Amino acid sequence: MRAASVHAVTTVHLARHGETDWNRELRWQGHADPPLNALGRQQARALAESLAGMRIAAVYSSDLRRASETAEIVAGRLEVPLHLDAALRELDVGSWEGHTLAELEARHAEAVARWEQSGEHGWEGGESHAEMAARVLEAIRSIAAGHVGEEVLVVSHGGPMRALRAFAAGLDYPDHRRLVPYTANCDVCAIAVEDGTIRGLD
């Protein structure tokens, strides 16, 4: 009788970080590093409680403070290791960082229109949506390879979460990111990773 095969699926729970003041002010954050505000810390504690009954083996997080502070609260509650990874950072929006869309429309109307109509990034410097998606996918595959058959939590940002959900749904993220649902602060979704293949679970 043949031995049962090893269950090679890794369940990755994806959580967005808690609220920052820049979230509240609708400012593009990118690689800027504002901390959680009081509501953000409350959201992180609620996230930790919601995951308390699950078998999370480890927590991985973007190294930006809004994510790492959220992850630290959750990992402390779950009593599991916390690992920071810069590859899980938000999209680098270059010259748009720190500005609201209204400010950008007033100063760079053409660039904003191009971004809204074609999806092409309008900022100077930074990175493209495709570049961000590629680094995040590589990071998730690496994390999953280290936790075969386990469940992990990854605390990241709206852009990376949309990229992963799009990829899991068979969509090209740079072209179809508006089809992927908006992720609120501390919202959670799940994907499965098996031998590098990613699929959605919810």
Image (spheres, helix red, strand yellow):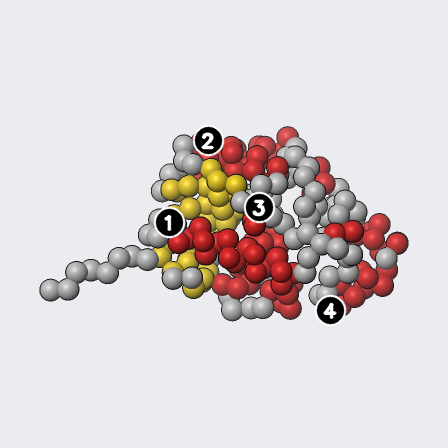
Percent from the top left, x then y, of residue 27?
Answer: 75, 45
Nearest to the observer: residue 126 or residue 33: 126
For residue 116, which quarter of the picture? bottom right
For mark 4, what is the residue?
Answer: 118
Q: Residue 187: image x %, image y %?
A: 55, 47
Task: For the N terminus, give its image quadrant.
Answer: bottom left
Identify the mark nearer the N-term, 2 or 1: 2
Tell me if mark 2 has few (under 14), some (14-19) or many (20+) residues whose alpha carbon lies within 10 angstroms of its own: some
Closer mark to the observer between disc 2 and disc 1:
1
Q: CA distance from mark 4 to mark 3?
A: 28 Å
Q: From the image, tell me which residue sits under label 3.
A: 86
Residue 50 seen from this side: no
Q: Secondary structure at mark 3?
A: helix
Label 2 sits on what residue type?
Gly
| Residue 43 position (above or below residue 153) | above
Q: CA distance from mark 2 to mark 4?
A: 42 Å
Q: Which residue is mark 2?
A: 76
Measured as percent of width and height from the top left, residue 190 is found at: 46, 53
Tag 2's secondary structure? helix
Mark 1–mark 4 distance (CA, rounded to whole Å): 38 Å
- Residue 17 in the image: above or below residue 42: below
Q: Which mark is residue 103?
A: none
Mark 3 and mark 2 in contact (Cβ < 8 Å)? no
**Label 1, label 3: how many angstroms apart (C-alpha)?**
19 Å
Q: Relative to residue 3, is residue 55 drawn left or right?
A: right
